[in-house]
């Protein structure tokens, strides 16, 4: 006897979810830190706050950061530092990707 309505084996959906969780880059750890910083590979951190040097992937996220952390200073989009324009990514290194994996 196996118990009340408990499947004996793992379902295909559960196995696929485990494979996806193991092989997808979610942006954490050392690889995620390099990706968020944006220096090494020209990652997702495109804009930098001129006041505290915090990075953000787009203008809207930077505006949310600015409204929360620097409410007394008016937000000026022209003062944002575009890190992709300043730092050119090395073409031999692979571009970072949040979805997908090299191990499949």
Image (spheres, grey):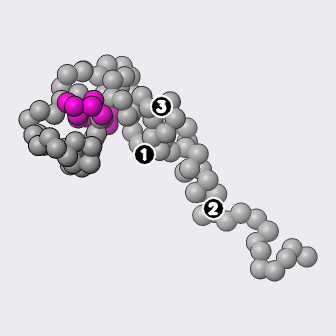
Q: Earlier in the sequence, mark 1 or mark 2?
A: 2
Residue 19 x/y as whole percent: 59, 50
For label 3, the crowd category at 10 Å Cα-Cα, with few meaning under 14, some 14 to 19 and many 20 or more, is: few
Q: Is residue 17 visible?
A: yes
x%, y% of residue 69? 27, 43
Instruction: Please say whether residue 52 is one of the residues in the magenta stretch.
Output: yes
Mark 2, secondary structure of its residue: helix
Residue found at x 33% / y 23%? 39
Q: Residue at x 33, y 32 (%)?
A: 43
Give the structural element (helix, strand or loop) at label 3. Answer: helix
Mark 3 and mark 1 residues within 8 Å of each other at the beta carbon? no
Q: Which residue is mark 2?
A: 14
Q: Quadrant of the N terminus?
A: bottom right
Q: Quadrant of residue 86?
A: top left
Q: Main secondary structure of the magenta part?
A: loop
Front residue (pair 53, 74) = 74
Q: CA distance from mark 1 to mark 2?
A: 19 Å
Q: Residues within 10 Å of mark 2 (few under 14, many from 20)?
A: few
In the displayed structure image, the side of residue 64 where residue 73 appears, left or right = left
Which region is colored magenta? 43-54
Question: Where's residue 68, x and y in %?
Answer: 26, 48
Residue denoted by label 1 = 99
Relative height, residue 19 to residue 6 (above, below) = above
Q: Disc 3 or 1, which lies upstream in sequence?
A: 3
Side of 95 relative to 74 (left or right):
right
Q: Earlier in the sequence, mark 2 or mark 3?
A: 2
Q: Is residue 71 left or right of residue 94?
A: left
Say which mark, if any, is on residue 79. none
> Which residue is the site of mark 3?
31
| Residue drawn at point x = 55 percent, y = 51 percent | 20
x and y percentages locating residue 48 in the rendered image: 24, 32
């Amino acid at each position: 006897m196996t118990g009340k309505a408990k499947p004996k084996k793992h379902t295909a959906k559960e196995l696929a979810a485990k494979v996806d969780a193991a092989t997808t880059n979610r942006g954490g750890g050392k690889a995620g830190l390099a990706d968020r910083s944006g220096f090494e590979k020209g990652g997702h951190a495109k804009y930098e706050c001129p006041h505290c040097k915090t990075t953000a992937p787009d203008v809207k996220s930077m505006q949310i950061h600015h409204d929360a952390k620097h409410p007394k200073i008016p937000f000026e989009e022209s003062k944002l530092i575009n890190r992709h324009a300043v730092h050119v990514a090395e073409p031999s290194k692979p571009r970072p990707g949040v979805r997908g994996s090299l191990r499949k």
